[in-house]
Image (cartoon, rainbow, N blue to C red):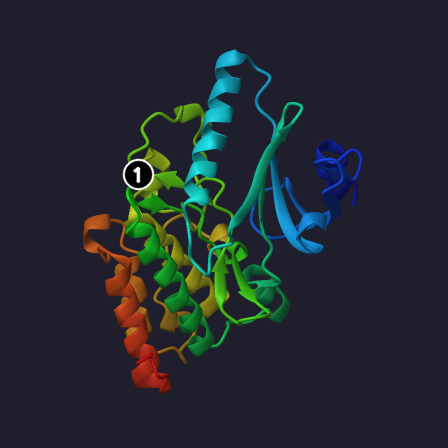
Amino acid sequence: MDSDKKPTQQYFPTGSLQDGRYILVNISEQGGMESAILARDLHMENQLVTIKAMIPSNSGPEARHEDIRNFELVLETLYRLNHPLIPAVTDSFREGTRYFLVQEYVVGANLQGLIERLMRPLPERAVLAHASQMLDILNYLEYQTPPIVHRNIKPANIIVSSKDKQAHLVDFSIARVLVNKKVNRKQIALGTPGYAPPEQYQDKADTRSDQYALAATLHHLLTNRDPQNQPPFAYPPVRLLNPQLSPDIERVLERALTIDAKKRYQNAATMKQDIDEILVERFGVDKSG
């Protein structure tokens, strides 16, 4: 448990921030950043929030400047997003040498924890419903000016809200605005092995890369085969691992997980249409609204 205490001591030595506005509750499990902290905002009726901290590099002024600039780019990106399934940024500030970002906290469970607890594939209908919600988010990000790539879609970053029962996408800490070419390559985070597509390791990610990562996530959820424990970029047909799945979802994943991005779905809306058709035709879900 010592590793759980270090981030608290490092980022919150007094148990609060902003002159006591934010009161530390616990280390947050939402998203992949170790510095994510769950806190209560006393200015917002004790509402739970997630606070993420960044400490600039101490290896020199150039590296420090790059860290701060990268943090500002992520912040600028998040401030302009307005989607019900993306936690909104509510505040940002600096204290000493640390920079902080405050977001809404999604009360619920992430899909990584769910499949680990169940130790079996999740039901196809539920997975596809969440996939449809994720693709609505990706479609929204594609239509931003310029488009935004999340670059770290995986089960741990998808939270099913206990309030609306929908899937919310968290942890935009390595999101990228596509026109941004000023990020130092040494500062580039490459995403999570097993989910990130090949082009992301060459810093050539685009919106199709998020669809690949979502497909890798769906493959994991539908088969209980964790791609992080397997050879890279290798996904057996899902029906070999789970014969109860529909041939249609196998075709969707095969296309979305193609190495060549030009042979994948070229936009999120097209992939969502195929997912929604399976929900309607196989499971009778009403998608008319």
Q: Is residue 245 above or below residue 199?
A: below
**Quadrant of the rendering where the C terminus is positioned:** bottom left
- Which element carries disc 1, helix, strand or loop? loop
The answer to whether 146 appears left or right of 53 in the picture is: left
Q: Nearer the viewer, residue 259 or 156?
A: 156
Q: Can the viewer see residue 39 in this picture? A: no
**Mark 1 — residue?**
178
The spot of residue 226 in percent (x, y) is: 50, 58
Q: Nearer the viewer, residue 156 or 220?
A: 156
Pick out the residue farthest to the left: 262
Q: Nearer the viewer, residue 217 or 11?
A: 11
Residue under the point 60% across and 53% down: 30
Callout 1, which amino acid? Leu
Q: Nearer the viewer, residue 258 or 1?
A: 1
The spot of residue 166 in percent (x, y) is: 49, 69
Dot 1 alpha-carbon crowd within 10 angstroms: few under 14, some 14 to 19, many 20 or more: some
Query: Quadrant of residue 116 in the image?
Result: bottom right
The answer to whether 239 appears left or right of 170 in the picture is: left
Q: Is residue 48 above or below residue 52?
A: below
Residue under the point 31% across and 78% down: 278
Query: Quadrant of residue 73 in the image?
Result: top left
Q: Can the viewer see residue 256 in this picture? A: yes
The spot of residue 113 in percent (x, y) is: 60, 61
**Quadrant of the rendering where the N terminus is positioned:** top right
The spot of residue 112 in percent (x, y) is: 56, 60
